[in-house]
Amino acid sequence: MSVDLDQTPRSLLVCERSSFCDENNRVSSQVEQLHFNYKVSVLLSDCSSAPSHLESLLTSFSHFYLVRNLPLHELLDKQFLETAVYQGNVYGLSYRTRLDEDNCVALMPNGHLVLSLDKDSFQVLGFEGKTSTFNYKTKNRYVVTVDLTDGSMAPGRQAYLRLLTGLTSRLPLQMDFLLSHHPGGGASLQALLSRYIWSEHKPEVGTCSLTHLPCPDLQSCDPHGLLEWLGAVDANISRDNSSSSFLSSLVCPEPKRTVSRALRISICGLLLPHDVQRLIQELRCYLGQCQPESWVSLTVHGFVDSPVSWGGKEHGVLRGGENFYTLFIFHDHTYHLHLAAGAQDTCPP
């Protein structure tokens, strides 16, 4: 066994406290910087069922598409570029590819195409790239980033043809691919979808009512302990540290109080920052109708195997691949924002 397996890997946690009333608050900009999200977890205190307006919003999250065995050169198709990429806000991500082993691809909403490639694939592709930030010693992974909206990448230009030839002839990669476009939706993607096997999906929503929930003091609790407690609640892990339990030794941080009822909500899929922004606004409206001691938490999880995380910066996996943020919202419009990343990530902005 490797001697470092029992060592806790480095992690990054950035914490911020402010108010939505402050015109310089960074919540909106931070939400926009985590592009590829697979899960949103919400915890509502003093609530047993979702209000109808909140339920309606959750069911209106943008649909997304799963395209089977998509040749990557299709992302350079002239019609696809004109109807989707040049319009902005196209989100694309290779599906069930492992960032520490496989070739992974992301199409960002600003039109940047990011390919995280193993050494052999990078050399065969024959296009400019750089050594992965997190594999600079072994140099077994490379990152190719191309701005598809740049004039040099216009169809017919030399750089465009070189990349197209690489993905068509030298490295004809195919992979299952997730796609979504806001606000174009399926219409802007239809020409590409029609050539392959595809399926349309809407985010899955789940709810669970909780009773007698031990809750730490959110204002004074250590951020690491607070997030650990929240993760245990979301994963339905016991926090009693009972002598009869061999599964969990977690306890609710002190000081604590018992919340008589709470509602846990989860949304899973390819979730767009635009929909997360709408959800935050709705949760703020909901809190305005609650008791002063009520609060809401919202955690957004980025895809573990996405080649990019915060602000389009390179993302790595190592042992976890976590990249997420948690937002606690209070009745008086104040908030606590926690941005977290694993060992192979740059510091969240």
Image (cartoon, rainbow, N blue to C red):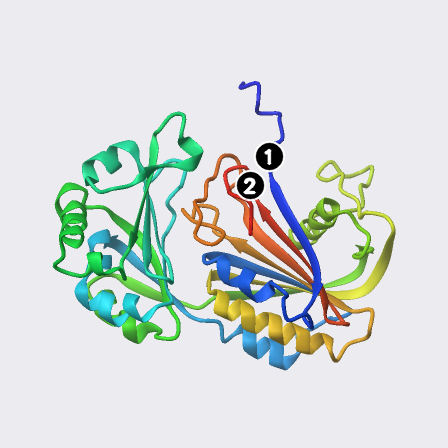
Front residue of this view, candidates 40 and 336: 336
Q: Which mark is residue 10?
A: 1
Question: Does residue 48 lie above or below 307 as drawn?
Answer: below
Residue 140 percent coordinates (x, y): 34, 30
Residue 340 lies, in percent from the top left, at 60, 48
Give the residue pinned by disc 2: 342
Give the amino acid type for the residue marked by disc 2 in the picture. Gly
Q: In this rendering, would 51 be left or right of 57? A: right
When the figure is inspected, residue 117 is found, relative to residue 291, above or below; the finding is above
Q: Amino acid at mark 1?
A: Arg
Q: Is residue 127 above or below residue 70?
A: above
Say which quadrant the N terminus sits in: top right
Residue 95, percent across and down? 37, 51
- Determine the residue positioned at 30% across, 59% down: 67
Q: Observer-nearest residue: 223 or 23? A: 23
Badge 2: residue crowd in 10 Å (few <14, some 14–19, many ≥20): many
Q: Is residue 165 left or right of residue 115?
A: left
Label number found at residue 135: none
Q: Residue at x 25, y 72 (%)?
A: 83
The location of residue 91, given as percent across then percent down, is 38, 62
Callout count: 2
